[in-house]
Amino acid sequence: MIVAIGKVFAALLAGCYKIIPDYGWSIVFFTLLSKVILIPISVLVQYNSIKMVKMYPDMNRIKAKFYGNSDMISEENYKLYKKENYHPMLDLVPVIVQLIVLMGVVEGLKRFSVTDTMFCGFDLGIIPAKVMGRYILVPLIAAVSAWFMCFVQNKANVLQSEQSKANKYTTMGISVGLSLYLGFFVTAGVALYWTIGNLLAVVQLFILNACISPKKYIDYEALKESRAELDKVEQYHKTAKKQVSKENQAREKQDYKRFFKYGYKQIVFYSEKNGFYKYFKNVIEFILAKTDIVIHYITGDPNDEIFKLTSDRFQTYYIGENKFIVLMMKLEADIMVMTTPDLQTYHIKKSLVQDNIEYIYMDHAMGDVNLSYRKHALDNFSTIFVPNELTEREIRAQEKTYDLKAKNIVRTGYGLIDDMISQYKPEERDADKIPEILIAPSWQQDNLIDMCIDEILDQILGKGYHVILRPHPQYVRHFEEKLNSIKEKYASHEDFELQMDFSSNKTVFDADVLMTDWSGIAYEYSFTTLRPTLYINTPMKIMNPDYEEIGIEPFDITVRDEIGISVDTDKLSDLASAVDRLLNDEVYSPESIASIREKYLFNIGKSGEVGARYIINKLIEYSKA
C-alpha cells in the first residue's frame, strides 16, 4: 500500500517540478497544493470543533453533576453527542490524512529523482543524521515550526484553546518530537515539506477563523459560567479528598484484613455510601431477630451511620471502592446482597475463587429497571428482589429477548415505602388549611428547576396554595448559588418556601400535592400518603436507549398517569387547573390511590420479612449441601 501511495505522490511531485523546475520550490508548491485540496476537510473539522466547544457548557455541567462517576459521564456525553449530531472521530480525520500524505511524501521523494536537489544551500536529498554538521539546523527548524504552529493553535484554534494545559503541552510535545525525528532521520526534503506545512497550517487557521468565526456559534459567557461551576465542584472534591485522613486509610486496611480473617461468610451486604442501609434495613433486622446468622456489612463511606449498629452478629467494615474491587474478586460467601447494578460489566466483578455465590440485587429505587439502568445491567445477578409484577415482567422479557439464563425472582415489595407507611400518621385535614404543594424535582439533566421553575412558580404562586420547593440533596450540593438566586427572587412571596433541610419527612407527609419530573419520590409520596402527584414532562432520563426492544411499556410511564396528572412543559398554563383536579376529583382520592398501590406493590408492610425468609431458607440449603 505504501509503495502504491509513493508512486502516486512521486507522480504528483514530478508534475509540480514540471511547473516549477526547482526541487525545493516544487516541494513548497506541492505542500501548498495539498493544503488547498484538503480545504473541504479542514472546513468540516472547523465546524465539528465549533460544535464540540458549543457543547462544552453542557459537558462541564454533566461532569460537575456526576463528578467521579466516569461511566455516567461517558453515558451522558454520548447522549449529548447523539443529540447534537457530533462525531468525535471527525477530529481525527486531518491527523489520519496528514499521516497518509506524510508517508506518501517520504516514499514519493525516494522515487522522485532529479539531478539538482540543492535548496538554500542545503542538499534536500541528504538525511541529516548521516552527515550532521550544519545539517543539524534541518531538524531544529522543523521542530521550531511545529512549536510555532502549536503555540498559535493553542491560542486561536477553537477547540485547542479550550483544552487543558496538560492536553495542549502534550500535543505540542508530540508534534515537536515528531518534527525532530523527521528532521534527523528522513531526507531534508521531507523536513522542508513538514516545515512549510506547519507554517501554512497557521495561515489556514486564521483564514478559517475569519470565514467561520467561532464567536458566531459559541456562547462564551455560558462556557465561562459552566467552567466556574465545574471548578467549584472540583475544588470541593479536592478539599474533601484532602480531608480523608491517614486514620481512615489505616482503618480501611484494618477492616480489610479483619473481613478476610473472619473466615467463611454466609451473607454479605454492600452499601456504596451512607444512607443505603434503609434499603436493606427490614431484611437485615428480620434475619437478626429470627436467626443466629452473622451478617457482614461493607460500606464505602467511613462516616456511615451504620457503624453505630455494629454488634457481634452485625459486623461492619469500611472498604473504599478500589479495595472493594479486590475484595469482590477474593470473596468467599454463600450470598452477596447489593444495590449496585452492572455486576461483572464494569469495575465490580464476581469472585474468582468461588463460582457458586448467589448474588442478590435489591433496588434502591422503585423506578423502571429496563429504562433507568444500562442495557444488561442486571444480567449477572443470580436473584432479583422485585417490588411489583411489572418489574418481574420486564426482567422475564429481557431474558427472552436477549436469550439469557432465567434468574430467581423474589416478589418482595419495597422496604423503604413500607417504612414510610409505618412512620406516616395521617392527621385529620383542617378544612381551612391552605393546600400545600411540594415541588420535589430530580437532579438529572433537564430537571424542572433547570428547565422551567420560573414558569411553574408564575402559574401557581398567588393562587391560594402554599408552595414549597425542596430540591434534591445533590442539587443543593452542586448548585447552591442557583438556589439562592431563586430564594432571593421569590423572597417577597409569603406563599413560597425554599426548603433545604432533609432531616425529616414531615414536609413530604404534610403536602397535599407533590410536583416532580421523573423523580422516584413520586412513588414514595403517593404510596405512603395516598395523595396524588403532578408530573412535569421534562425530557425523560433514558439510560437504556434500546428499552423498547422488550416490548413492555416502562413502569415509570405506566404509573405516571395512574397516580396523578402529567403536564407538558409547553402547557404549564394548565398547572393551576391540574392542581385543582388533583385536590378535588374522586379519581385521585385516597381510596383510588390505595387500589393502585395494591396493584403495584407486593407484600405491603411485609417486604422485609419476605426477602429475609428467602435468604434464611437459602442459607439453610447451602449449609446442608
Image: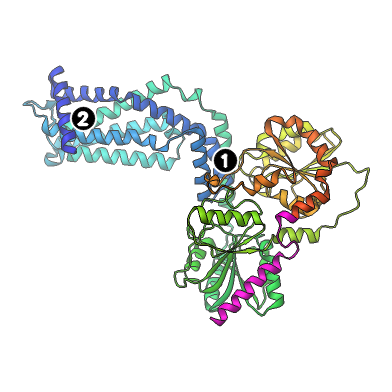
Q: Main secondary structure of the magenta part?
A: helix
Residue at (36% x, 37% y) in the render: 92
Q: Which residue is mark 1?
A: 61
Nearest the camera: 336 or 226?
A: 336
Q: Is residue 623 on the magenta stretch?
A: yes
Q: Secondary structure at mark 1?
A: helix
Nearest the camera: 491 or 279?
A: 279
- Are there few (<14), some (14-19), or many (20+) residues within 10 Å of tag 2? many
Task: State the extent of the magenta-drawn residues as a range.
Answer: 598-625
Q: CA distance from mark 1 to mark 2?
A: 45 Å
**Residue sitting at the far left:** 115
**Residue sitting at the far top:** 19
Q: Which residue is mark 2?
A: 192
**Which amino acid does the dot numbered 2 rest on?**
Leu
Give left or right: position of 225 versus 423. Answer: left
Q: How is the image coloured?
A: rainbow
Task: Estimate the x, y position of residue 611 in percent, counting from the top left.
Answer: 66, 67
Residue at (16% x, 35% y) in the render: 4
